[in-house]
Amino acid sequence: MSSDIAPPAAGAEPAAGAGMQGARPDRPAGPRIRQSLWQQAGRWEVGLVIVLIASLAFGSSESSTFDSQTTLFYGGINAGFISIMALPMMLIVVTAEIDLSVASTLGMAGALLGDLWHHGWGLWPALIAALAVGVVGGALNGFLVAKAGLPSIAVTIGTLTLYRGIAEILLGSQTIPGAGDRTFPAWFTKIGVVPVPGTHLSYTTVFFIVLAIICGVVLHATPLGRSLYAIGLQPEAARFAGIRVARIKFWLFVASGLICAFAGILLVAQNSSVSYNAGYGLELNVVAIALFGGVSIFGGRGTVLGVVLSAAIVATLQMAMTQMNIDPNVQEIVIGALLLISVVVPSLGKLARWPALRARRSRS
Amino acid sequence: MKRSNRSRFVATRRPAILAFAAVAAVSTIAACSSSSSSSSSSAAASSSSAAASTSASASASSSGGSSTGIKKGLVVYFIPKDTQNPYEVLADQGGAKALAELGGKVVVSSGTADTAAAQIPSIQAAIQAHANAIVIAGNDPSALCPSLQQAATAGIAILSFDSDVTCGSSPNHLFVNQANTESIGTSEVDILAKEIGDSGQIAILSAAASATNQNSWIAYMKQELKKYPKMTLVKTVYGNDDPATSLTVLQGLLSAYPNLKGIISPTTVGIQAAAQYLDTHKSLLSKLTLTGLGLPSQMKPYVKDGTVKEFELWNPSQLGYLAGYAAASLASGTATLTTGSSFKAGSLGTYKVLAPTTGVGPSIVLGPPTVFDAANIDQFNF
């Protein structure tokens, strides 16, 4: 028994004996694994609720300015556009892929919007072009991953650099609007300054909630959502069951590109301006929110509720720690620790079920 | 055997996960509260000084003419480009010294990356803490403006230093300029021209492509280069004020332009990275000259061994000290943004607000930059 558990060298092909051993109980255990994963996901969210309550309690006890509506508004300003990108990310991670080009797609869409605005385009055509470039960027990722069958981590590291490079070529050292440019219309830029009327929520927060509800319905209440889990758990079996794995993955990347471009537009509006480095380096925050939300990096597990809770926790901690003027390095350590916990805790469970898991992965 | 193990695990998993969540929360809180106490105690230390209120009434050329003096207990948020940059750290210390003399305190808040997104939460924190003034070194000329406008609306005096923000009138703010922007740009070209004999290919190693200060200096460098027709600027590269990135773009530059004769790096991070590289590749020194803006303390070894002959800078802690006094004067109403309004800046003397020019609003200028070389570098300890 101990020899089965001891070497958790992830990804390594198991020795023949261990593989046989793991394969044996698989057929009856299939649906049961599924069920227990659901239960485990439920428990993970209970843990997240506790951490969220603890973060809120921590903020209001340690920071004198935490208990105010402006904290809610500012938190939305800071985290809203990042959290929006975490939604398509979690859908992609559920299918056991990843999209690391999200922040660069955001930057590229924002840069195109700025460049077209600089060249005299109207706002609406420029907005549509920015969304379109997001779709094209997502489609390139989707084509290379789903149709050409390349590993998504490699593809999207490539496009991470590519899309940021395009943003840099478009804008260079300019910030739009610069000297001589028209300023963006007030209805567009007010989203960075005022909350949604009648509430204390930023516009980005409201968009995040709406998108989260849509994602939640799609993932948890439609055949498409169930097929995403199936793809993440057993792509071969999913394909034999008639699920169009490649097509679904392709459109997921397109959706990711579109939503990241939308987040890029929101960021331009919020900042009343854009430069090529908008959103630089945020892809890791996006991945962190998804993983801390309980989405398994191996695919097949995760809920939208978990991601929403995780986004709320990250925003809460960031607001509280900045208000308390905690060293930004310490803030990064805290976020890093959360990410580690989110990876370590579920794999404590995996460790015990290691043989079954290993058998499953060796087959896929 | 395996089955029994799994069922045992299922039975114990629920409490285990809850326990982990609780541990996570507790350890997070523990980590945060310990560091918060240390930062607040250091802030408290600076407010103990019983400084006499410095009156700015002596030179009453300001329009108001009232002599209310500097208020006590002012809170000024210094928001540097990031918290690591040694130049910014010195400037923030200068600001803290100024506010300590005035019976107020400085809170330094920023991120670890040179982005607007990392500075916006600090502006929000200043608003929520009801700070009296914000002194910011902008990572982006425009992206910070909506947040700064909210701060101004909340009654906070807005100042920029090191790198200006271009917000127009929303909000109006005072730019504490380190040295005349034009003279920084032109003098660096003049220094390099003198060293390489007025001819050859040169390049610029800058910070972030969106940095306002860098771009305005570079614009003046290009203007000054018209005086030297045999010198051609082949490329401007951006190291983002990150040593590793600066080194990478420098190496790219050297391989793309093997005949390069001079490099100007108008940033302390860039010039140090370049000096370090040249120091380990001495064969390049016979044809390549490096100058720019550097910290004497960092550049001393390279000046002593001849890697760099001359470079420039002003005293960053004096810049922060001046910004601190300017912030306190604006927040107390003893100075205004009106051209000619004057205030006393402690040991630095009296400063007057200069008229706005193209692209720059009301500003004050610390003084001319100092040129450092092997003869004088030992006299400076910043």
Image (cartoon, coloured by chain):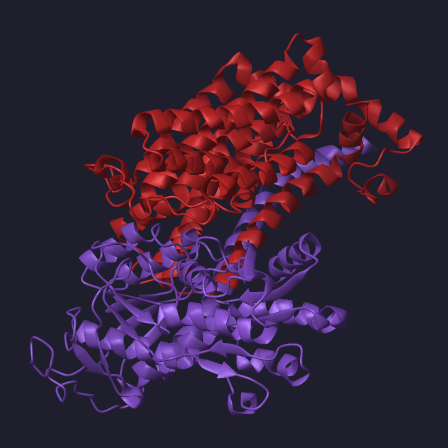
Chain colours: A red, B purple
Above or below, comparing residue B32 to residue A245 in the picture: below
Quick one: quadrant of the C terminus of chain A?
top right
* Residue positioned most to the front: B229
| Label total for image | 0
Above or below, comparing residue B162 to residue A277 in the picture: below
Q: In the image, residue A279 lies at what x, y percent?
A: 47, 44
Front residue (pair A328, A107): A107
* B291 horizontally vs A56: left or right: right
Quarter where residue B354 is shown? bottom left
Quick one: quadrant of the N terminus of chain A?
top right
* Residue positioned most to the top: A242
Front residue (pair A283, A220): A283
* A52 horizontally vs B336: left or right: right
> Which residue is depicted at the point 60% across and 20% down?
A249
> Which residue is depicted at the point 42% across and 61% down?
B223
Above or below, comparing residue B146 to residue B180 in the picture: above
Q: In the image, residue A180 lies at what x, y percent?
A: 28, 45
Whether residue B47 is visible = no
Q: In the image, residue B154 lies at what x, y percent?
A: 19, 58
Whether residue B118 is visible = yes
Quarter where residue B319 is shown? bottom left
Q: In the image, residue B178 lies at what x, y percent?
A: 37, 74
> Which residue is depicted at the point 54% across and 59% down?
B27
> Which residue is depicted at the point 29% across and 60% down?
A65
Quarter where residue A195 is shown? top left
Front residue (pair B284, A93): B284
